[in-house]
Amino acid sequence: MSKNKKLVISLLVIAVLMAILPLFMLKNAEFGGSDDAGSEVVSEIQGGEYEPWFEPIIETALGKELPGEVESLLFCVQTGIGVGIIAYYMGRFVERKKHEDNKK
């Protein structure tokens, strides 16, 4: 096995362990989102209830809060676009290197 393959496999194993180990090590922990934690800290500092500066644009246009499924869909679409862009450029770099190696 080449040096690069060993490095990639070891980094993938480390990433998976970093994601899974906290779930088993901290059995009674609550894994909340950063939005909740941030508004709690602001409420503690202000000494009162947190009041946002503005309402989200889409929720204002609809006149109601977006369902969780729609928020998840928008987040997944945004993630997919980002991953597509990263994969495109990584593929270009790999093909460029292959093309340059073939010229030599």
Image (cartoon, rainbow, N blue to C red):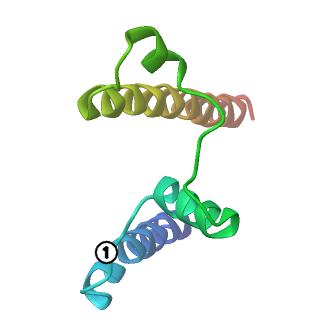
Q: Is residue 67 left or right of residue 3?
A: left
Q: Where is residue 44 shown, x and y percent of the image?
A: 61, 69
Q: Quadrant of residue 101?
A: top right
Q: Quadrant of residue 30?
A: bottom left
Q: Look at the numbered disc 1 and give the secondary structure of its residue.
A: helix
Residue placed furthest toward the front: 48
Q: Nearer the viewer, residue 4 or 59?
A: 59
- The residue at 69%/68% (across/down) is 45
- The residue at 53%/25% (across/down) is 56
Q: Which quadrant of the rendered structure holds the C terminus?
A: top right
Q: Quadrant of residue 25?
A: bottom left
Q: Nearer the viewer, residue 31 or 93?
A: 31
Residue placed furthest toward the top: 61
Q: Where is residue 74 shown, x and y percent of the image?
A: 39, 26
- The residue at 45%/34% (across/down) is 79
Q: Nearer the viewer, residue 17 or 47?
A: 47
Q: Is residue 85 left or right of residue 63?
A: right
Residue type, label 1 = Ile
Q: Which quadrant of the rendered structure holds the N terminus?
A: bottom left
Crowding near pointer 1: few (<14 within 10 Å), some, many (20+)?
few
Q: Nearer the viewer, residue 8 or 98?
A: 8
Q: Where is residue 98 shown, x and y percent of the image?
A: 62, 34
Q: Is residue 42 left or right of residue 40?
A: right
Residue beneath label 1, please?
A: 20
